[in-house]
Image (spheres, rainbow, N blue to C red):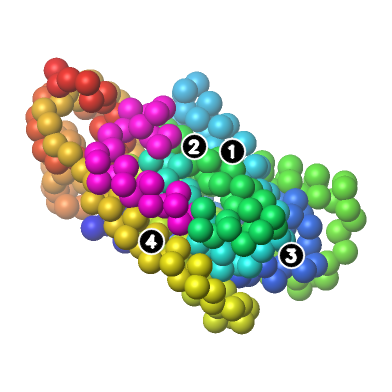
Amino acid sequence: MYGSALALLAALLFAASIPASKILLESLRPFQLAGLLYLGAAIGMAPLLVLERRRHTRIALDRSNAARLAGAVLLGGLLGPVLLLLALRLTLASSVSLLSNLEMGATAVLGVALFREHLGRTGWLGVAGIVLAGAILAGGGWPDALAALLVAAACACWGLDNHLTALIDGITPARSTLVKGTVAGVTNLAIGVATDPLSASAPLLLAALLVGAASYGASIALYILSAHELGATRAQAIFAAAPFAGAALSFALLGEPFALTQGAAFLLLLVSVGALFRSQHAHPHVHEALEHIHSHRHDDGHHLHEHPGLERTLRHSHAHRHERFRHSHPHWPDIHHRHGHRHAT
């Protein structure tokens, strides 16, 4: 329940960025806006970082986690948002919002191909439905088709980003969001200013930073927490509410027309997302000995270390060690379930 609530809140915050970005692109270039949005994300993390320092939160990035973070910055911070904003310049914000559901399909397929996740028949039907809905939305001519390709490329970047951030366990979500926001923001803004002088007014620049703080900063941090709980694919299943909410906001705030193709894609996406979310499995599996740090509770069947006087339902974060053990239960590919599926050992 905790992870699901975090993913839903992250989705609603991100949904508002699509129509807001459409408006901001009237005065800003894609690289400029992408930079400002991620700088806003970094600024939005400042209060959380102050709290972390007061609590003396441990930060310990090893080489593997540093590489994952670098990949997340490159794919999710530098490339993904620019591709999405380029698509927004070509077509309706409502269509881009619905097309961004491709991120969920990309996350699922990449999870199976590269990150040892499992997807059953129902899940694969969900992925197929999402791709078909994207094809429906891309059928309005060359600008729409090009926009769909750009969104698909952005979603592939974010799909990889989702898995990489779900595996980072030596740094807090706020800290990783600060790193991503700072590096991606400074880099994209520098490219944007170098290619086209920044001419937007101060209030517009402030608006872009505020959108970034809420729709990227807070949303990213909440999503990372939910992905640790649910796994990247299932967290993305809940986060898939964002495209629907973004489309609704685009219709309401921008006055965009509602086409029959959008209605058909909307219904197909709704069914497909539900199918992918319902895909789960259970089998005997082994948890190897592991030491890491992340937010957890002691009533989940995996965190067996003791805290005298601490309620088992109280969520907390610290470095802890798991001893090797074997059990069987319905599970999702969260941070504790990255095993293969050819056989149980």
Q: Earlier in the sequence, mark 2 or mark 1?
A: 1
Which residue is pictured at 72% across the width and 68% down the height?
A: 24
Picture layout, residue 7 above or below residue 161 = below
For marks 4 and 3, the one nearer the N-term is 3
Q: Quadrant of the N terminus?
A: bottom left
- Tag of residue 75: 1
Image coordinates of residue 9 in percent, x first then y, are 40, 64
Q: Which residue is mark 4?
A: 268
Q: Quadrant of the C terminus?
A: top left
Q: Which element type, helix, strand or loop, lies under badge 2?
A: helix
Task: Name the residue that disc number 3 marks.
Answer: 25
Give, as a single range, the part of the protein colored magenta: 109-134
C-alpha span from label 2 to label 1? 7 Å
Report the mark closest to the observer, 1 or 4.
Answer: 4
Task: Report, in whole angstroms, how far the alpha carbon at label 1 lies from the one at label 4.
Answer: 28 Å
Element under disc 4: helix
Alpha carbon separation for disc pair 2 and 3: 26 Å
**CB-based contact (under 8 Å), mark 4 and mark 2:** no
Amino acid bearing label 1: Leu
Residue 241 in magenta? no
- Tell which circle, 4 or 2, labels the residue nearer the N-terminal end: 2
Residue most extreme to the right: 197
Q: Position of residue 196 (x, y in %)?
A: 88, 53
Mark 1: few/some/many CA within 10 Å (<14, 14-19, 20+): many
Q: Is residue 111 magenta?
A: yes
Q: Are marks 2 and 3 in contact (CB under 8 Å)?
A: no
Q: How many marks?
A: 4
What's the magenta bit mostly, secondary-structure-wise? helix
> Which disc is residue 160 wearing?
2
Mark 4 touching mark 3, by CB under 8 A? no
